[in-house]
Image (cartoon, grey):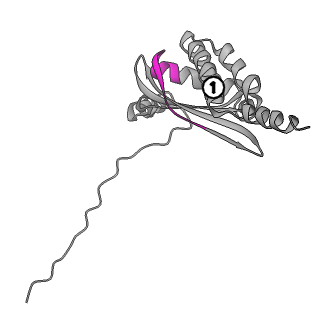
């Protein structure tokens, strides 16, 4: 009985070891980035967890990969900028932020995982890059193609405020 409590405590601490979670996350990120750079959407979809699939359809996911690939291209290099591991009653959540150099520009990828070890699953992937912003040319092209979701953009005239200064007595 004396050894049971320390052994149980060590097991629980090992299960939520932040460095182990970060390392496991980085391994999964390397696999995800390789599949992304290879254009293997099936492999990418297989890597996401059920929580991801509940909020993103396969078609939406494929569209996302198409846009990111077209705008940024394959990954040339990537380096971890930070990570966070949070364990609470809902489970263990690991977030890893990567500074990524794509073929056509740089970006920041944020990967969110839930679980530990072999049970860790990807529940979120965000890519932030100037190259992913919609430009006026994009909107004009969509309007020319008759996209019904495009709102006509009218230039906004700057507001000029008249100020009257009272003469000094």
- Residue denoted by label 1: 25
Looking at the image, which residue is at 58% across and 26% down? 64
Q: Quadrant of the N terminus?
A: top right
View extreme (front): residue:
2
Residue 127, x across and y down, in percent: 52, 30
- Does dot 1 land on a helix, a strand or a loop? helix
Q: Nearer the viewer, residue 42 or 169?
A: 42
Q: Quadrant of the C terminus?
A: bottom left
Q: Quadrant of residue 93?
A: top right
Q: Is residue 42 above or below residue 93?
A: above
Q: Is residue 121 above or below residue 167?
A: above
Q: Is residue 75 left or right of residue 88?
A: left
View extreme (left): residue:
169
Residue 115 visible in this rendered orientation of the protein: no
Looking at the image, which residue is at 45% across and 17% down? 77
Residue 34, x across and y down, in percent: 57, 13
Residue 48 visible in this rendered orientation of the protein: yes
The span picked out in magenta is 68-84
Is residue 75 shown in magenta?
yes
* Mark 1 neighbour density, 10 Å: few (under 14) some (14–19) many (20 or more): many
Looking at the image, which residue is at 77% across and 43% down? 90
Q: Quadrant of residue 86?
A: top right
């Amino acid at each position: 009985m004396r050894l049971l409590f320390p052994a149980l405590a060590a097991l629980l601490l090992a299960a939520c070891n932040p460095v182990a979670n970060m390392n496991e996350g980085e391994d999964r990120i390397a696999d995800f980035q390789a599949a992304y750079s290879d254009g293997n959407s099936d492999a990418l979809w297989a890597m996401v967890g059920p929580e991801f699939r509940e909020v993103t359809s396969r078609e939406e996911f494929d569209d996302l990969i198409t846009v990111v690939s077209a705008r940024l291209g394959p990954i040339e290099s990537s380096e971890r900028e930070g990570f966070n591991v949070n364990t609470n009653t809902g489970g263990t959540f690991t977030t890893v932020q990567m500074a990524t150099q794509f073929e056509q520009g740089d970006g920041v990828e944020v990967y969110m995982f839930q679980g530990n070890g072999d049970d860790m699953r990807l529940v979120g992937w965000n890519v932030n890059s100037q190259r992913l912003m919609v430009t006026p040319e994009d909107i004009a092209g969509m309007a020319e193609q008759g996209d019904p979701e495009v709102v006509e953009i009218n230039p906004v005239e700057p507001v000029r405020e008249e100020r009257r200064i009272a003469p000094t007595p």
